[in-house]
Structure formats: structure tokens, C-alpha cells
Amino acid sequence: MTQRITVRVNGIPETAEVAPDRTLLTFLREDLDLTGAKEGCNEGECGACVVLVDRKPINACLMLAVEADGREVVTIEGLAKDGVLHPLQRKFLEHQALQCGFCTPGMILTTLGLLAENPSPSEGEVRRALSGNLCRCTGYRQILDAVQDAAAELRGTGKGAAR
Amino acid sequence: MNVRPLEFRTARSTAEATALWAEVPDAYYLAGGTDLLIQMRLGRRSPARLIDLKRIPGLSAIEVRGDGALSIGACVPLGVIAAHPEVRARYPLLAECCLAVGSYPVRNRATMAGNVCNASPAADTAAALLALEAAVEASGPNGDVVLPLAGFFQGPGKTVLPAGALVTALVLPAKAAGCRGSFHRLSRRRGVDLATLGVLVGRHAAGGAGAHRVVLTAVAPTPLRVPAAEALLDRQGAAAAAQAAEAARAACKPIDDVRGTAQYRREMVGVLVARAAAALG
């Protein structure tokens, strides 16, 4: 028993037949081959699966694909335009805010949600917003620096974080 | 993920939702899903049908009613509640408790109605909702009901919500506006983890008899209000912080679990009630 859904993913309308118990995460990874969102804990603790749904960061492991019907999803694959990284992606590279990279898509999309709501977050606000995104490599310092640097650049360009 | 074939239905009205529930055994209402999906994955619940409530008009609204009460729709995510100007201005303790749940991405999905219906002894929003004497509004096969949150919880995972009823809103009375204080929460790590214990101490601006609130979480089978501690604070204010702490220690019934021992929880209830009461000034 499947159900037909239409989801706009990174700007492209995708229509698919999905089982009702398929998570958005599995749908993105296995049906659309968008493997940027990662399956870590599968219970909303680690943040590796975070994507934007209608511009809000959510854990894709805790949402069913059928719930995304008619919604707009942005994954890490949707950020670079014409081969040019989003400023936040570039700042993560410049600050070496990643090592293995497993947590990075979730970190970046959670941060984009934060910066859309609050373009000038304090370090405490960044720490609280990212408390549901675990990194086992960096020790977080570089991530916090990358976020602040990117926030400053995005404020400067006046473009804001939202895409 | 589910252990048996699952059907997903989208309700467009509460009447349609309760009718869909009555059609098949093992139907479940779905709001944010941040607890239910995990329970399905663990095999603790295996619904035959999920009834999504999020597209029912009105369940995603926060509104001030004619009598000044604030109604928070069952499908409003916790992040939206915590950021709402009416909540922040009139019920700051509720905003604080909403922000204690999960993480920022979880709060973009998880709902307060879900937190209440899940009926965890550690439910963070229950601390504020009990202190503010909130009411649960529900629609069921036998009509609409209004249930005070006091008495709503019967034990871990158990509530007095009638079978087949769905919560439509949580309502904060106008008279509870302006209750201030603090929510102290211990967990193994500061973000995301469930509470090892929680303590809320609040006071209504008017003062006098009935002004104080002391609520404990994760130290009894249900979130727990402690009238004896409240009465002590009503009479003597912060000067009674130590006695209020002792009353709270006596009232709680903690257990040993992976997050802490009963002894640790009881000790910390005392420490945190004293601290929160002293902070009232």
C-alpha cells in the first residue's frame, strides 16, 4: 500500500509513490539518492539528518515522507548554486569546521534556520541552536567560529541566510 | 519502520479525525510525531492507521479568547509557542519550559499537546502547565470535553483522556498571566536529553494566599504539584525556602533509573526548590 506524494526538493517538484511508514530521511536518501542528510541515531538526538521543511530545520528521521506532501524541502545538495558554495559552506571549509563530515549537512542546515530567524546570534544562541547536532571530531570551536564568520558575511551582503 | 502495514490518513476536521479513529482498531492521532515515530521504530506501538491532525484548520493557531484566556492549538510546534509574543509576555514560565524540550529542530515539529498526551513523568511543559492551571480541550466520539490538567496525568503514559478523543487545544486562564519564577532542570547533558529531574517555582504578582507554585518533574509517576511547599512560601516567602525544599523532598517519590538514583533525585529536589524559592526574592 503506497501513497502518491509531491514534494518540492531543492526547487524541483518530485512525485513519488511511498509507503506510509517511510521516513522523509529514507525517501530522500534511497528514493531520490540525496545522501547528504545522514542517518545517525534515528531518534532525533544527533541532528545528522536535519533538512529544511518550509524553511524550518527538522529531523528528517522523525518525519514521514507522506507528511512532506505539498511541502518544500531543502537538503545540503540544494545550497551550492552553479558550482559555487553557499557562504556558510565556504566558511565551514575556511575554518576547518569539519573532519569526517558526517554531521556537517545537519550543522549547516540547522544554522541556516537559525540565521534566517536571528541574523546576529550570540555565541550562546548558536550553541543552544546547535545543541541537537552532535559532532565527534571538531570539538565544536571551529564550527562556532565558522557560523559567526558566515553570519557576519551574510549580514554584510544583505542577502540573508534564507535561500 | 512500522511492524505491520500502515495506513496514513489526513484529517481536515476534528469530526473527520474522530470518525477515522473509530473505523479501525489501533488507530493513532499524529501531531508532531517526535515521540510516536520513535515508539513505532522500537516496536512499542504499532498503529494500523495514523491520522494526521496538522492540516485541520484551527489546530495550528494561538489565540486570545474573549475572556482573556490564551488558547494554544494542539498542532502548534513548541518553537512557535516559545517565540509567541503573548506567551513570552504573559506566561514566560511556559516559554521557558517549551525551550527545555528536545533541540531546536525537534521543537520545530514537537507539540505541547503531544508532550502532554505522551504523559511522561519528565514532561517539561507539564511543569508550567500545572503551575498555570491550564485546561485540556479535547474532541471525542462522544463530544467535546474540557479537562483540568490537574488530575489529567494518571501515571507514566496514562491520562484521563477518553478513548478516541483528540486534544484540540491547551488553554491558559487569564488569571494565570504574570506568574513568574524559574524552571531548573538537570540532565546528563544540557541539550536534548530527557530531564533527570525538573523543578519549577513560580509566584503570581498579586502575592498572598495561593500565589506560589511548586511543581516537580521526573520524581514521581506523574508531574507533581506540591501544595504544602506552596503554602509555606505563601506565608513566609523566600524565608521559607528551606522548609519548602523539605516539603518537596517529602512529597516526591523518585525511582532509580539510567538517569539517576532515587536518592540523588530526592536530594536535588531539595537543592533546586531552595534555590528557585530564594531566587524569587
Image (spheres, coloured by chain):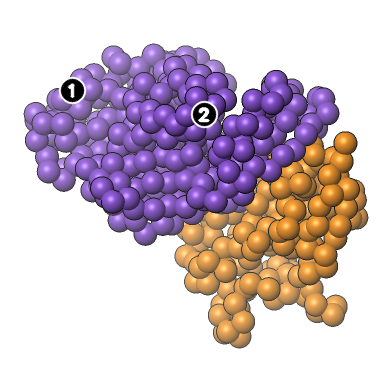
Task: Give the left or right position of residue B67, taking residue A67 as reference.
Answer: left
Point 39% across, 53% down: residue: B63
Q: Position of residue A116 (x, y in %)?
A: 57, 69
Given the image, on which type of amino acid does mark 1 rest? Gln
Q: Report which residue position mark 2 lands on.
A: B140
Task: Give the left or right position of residue A150, taking residue A4 as reference.
Answer: left
Q: Nearer the viewer, residue B93 or B252?
A: B93
User: Which quadrant, please, contains the N terminus of chain B?
Assistant: top right
Chain A display color = orange
Which of the chains is purple? B
Q: Report which residue position mark 1 lands on.
A: B243
Which callout, 1 or 2, points at the residue further toward the start of the chain? 2
Q: Which quarter of the figure has residue B237?
A: top left
Q: Position of residue B273 (x, y in %)?
A: 28, 30
Task: Give the left or right position of residue B195, taking residue B4 as reference.
Answer: left
Judge whether residue B119 can be spotted in this image. Answer: no
* Residue at disc 1, secondary structure: helix
Q: Residue furthest bottom?
A: A157
